Image (tube, helix red, strand yellow):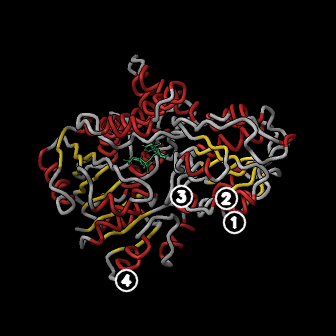
Amino acid sequence: MRIAVVGTGYVGLVSGTCFAELGHDVVCVDKDRAKIALLAGGDIPIHEPGLRELVARNAEAGRLGFTTDLGAAVERAEAVILAVGTPSLPNGEADLTHLEGAVREIASAMNAYKLIMTKSTVPVGTNARLRALLASLTDRPFDIVSVPEFLREGSAVKDTFHPDRIVVGADREEAGAAAAALHRPLTDRIFVTDVRSAEMIKYASNAFLATKISFINEIANICEKVGADVGQVAAGMGLDNRIGSSFLKAGIGYGGSCFPKDTRALIQIAGNVDYEFKLLKSVVDVNRDQRFSVVRKLRRLYGDLAGRTIAVWGLAFKPNTDDVRESPAVDIVAALLDLGAHVRACDPIALPNFRSCHDHERIAWCGDALEAAQGADAVCLLTEWPEFAAVDLGRLRQAMRQPVLIDGRNQFDAERLEGAGFAYSSIGRPALNREEGEAAEPADAQPNRNNIA
Ligand code: UDX
């Protein structure tokens, strides 16, 4: 099939490449000339394991091309995938400007029937709106089908080739069958439903996963107070098939380009029909608050943070990505700076992205974990990159002014850290008791270890 993919973000680039790999003839379109030039030159603008090789192989085979000319790409295509961004407006609602703009351009290029599949995350009713808009601009036949995308950053290629399910929302049976057939090589689990339900499935899925995270984070906060271990609690809960073990990792909460945006959008979608989604509002509040638990722990330990040096390990919203959008690190670093601290930050790949938006005279940008820890009063682990957990504790202790580690992602074993002489605190796990005066630091600079949990 000849396919045009509009939008070369995560979703567009990965799904376009995936369909080329399946043998289709794919052209990816973007308005951003620099991005298209980069892609056409064999470079890819995002960090995504396995994607570069896949793009190169399919481009070389002549199955995958890149252009800024939407009209030409749509004219030659039998199917069009809409994968343009739907960022948040200030009120939380999804901004559909790019999507509507793309549909207007498609209208001018309509020379025959097109199967249009929307993979962008869009509020319920959007596909109906787009259908009405396109019908008002062209007499040519078309279908608009909703095929929401569930891929995760960092494992986008794997998720695209091995999805848990494909959801197809169509109002005409033949259109649903055609979209299902296109995706059939990826999985047999294809759920065909109406367009509005498909649109809702995407938001409801992301909102549910976000709810699991905020839920376990609140359980973690209670665990800290009652002396239970949230890791054990989650493991025990996860054995119940009705609950499942995934998305029960306590920490400093979710970030990224999807959960924060989609939860806000669903609250707004509900609000637009006079329904207050109380549960989801709390999920969002809990998530916002959870990231500051790291800062609260530091303040309990040191009181005033002014003049203290804090090492920040990890800036990306999760490992295996250089994406810092809505990363907990953004708020945590800002809070530390507000409180007068000096920050020494590192991340294996996300540092340039973070620095380009959040540079500050009191941030020292460091090449690795040990460099960041140099002279620090505390290390805060914010992203669970494997290299952080593998750090040599002896060298770390030597590098730091105070051996204090606040573990926002529960990556270390408390006993091991305490054994190595660290004051250690994680999220929702009991801190080991230490005798007063056991620490080796000079008394004047000594943190109050009893306050670390
Ligand atoms: C998510 C959805 O998983 C995906 O289906 C959708 O298409 C886009 O949004 P992504 O944003 O790439 O994907 O990341 P994901 O791996 O789901 O993690 C999201 C955030 O939740 C990260 O910040 C992660 O650190 C956090 N998280 C995840 C937890 O804090 N605890 C968990 O147990 C799981």
Where is residue 284 drawn, in percent x and y?
Answer: 50, 30
Residue 337 image offset from top left, x and y in percent = 77, 42
Q: How far apart are the two marked residues, 4 and 1, measured between alpha carbons?
A: 35 Å
Q: Secondary structure at mark 2?
A: strand
Tell me the amino acid under the disc marked 2.
Answer: Cys
Q: Are marks 4 and 1 in contact (CB under 8 Å)?
A: no
Q: Residues within 10 Å of mark 2 (few under 14, many from 20)?
A: many
Helix, strand or loop at label 1? It is: loop
Q: Label 1, on which residue?
A: 367
Of the residues under marks 3 and 1, which one precedes in the sequence? 1
Closer to the chain start, of discs 4 and 2, is: 4
Residue under circle 2? 346
Q: Nearer the viewer, residue 369 or 208?
A: 369
Q: Earlier in the sequence, mark 2 or mark 1?
A: 2
Q: Quadrant of residue 387?
A: bottom right
Q: Which mark is residue 385?
A: 3
Taking the spot 78% from the left edge, 31% from the top edge, the residue there is: 303
Residue 228 locus on image (x, y percent): 47, 31
Residue 390 pos. (x, y %): 55, 62
| Relative height, residue 193 to residue 156 (above, below) | above
Of residues 374 and 421, the one nearer the viewer is 421
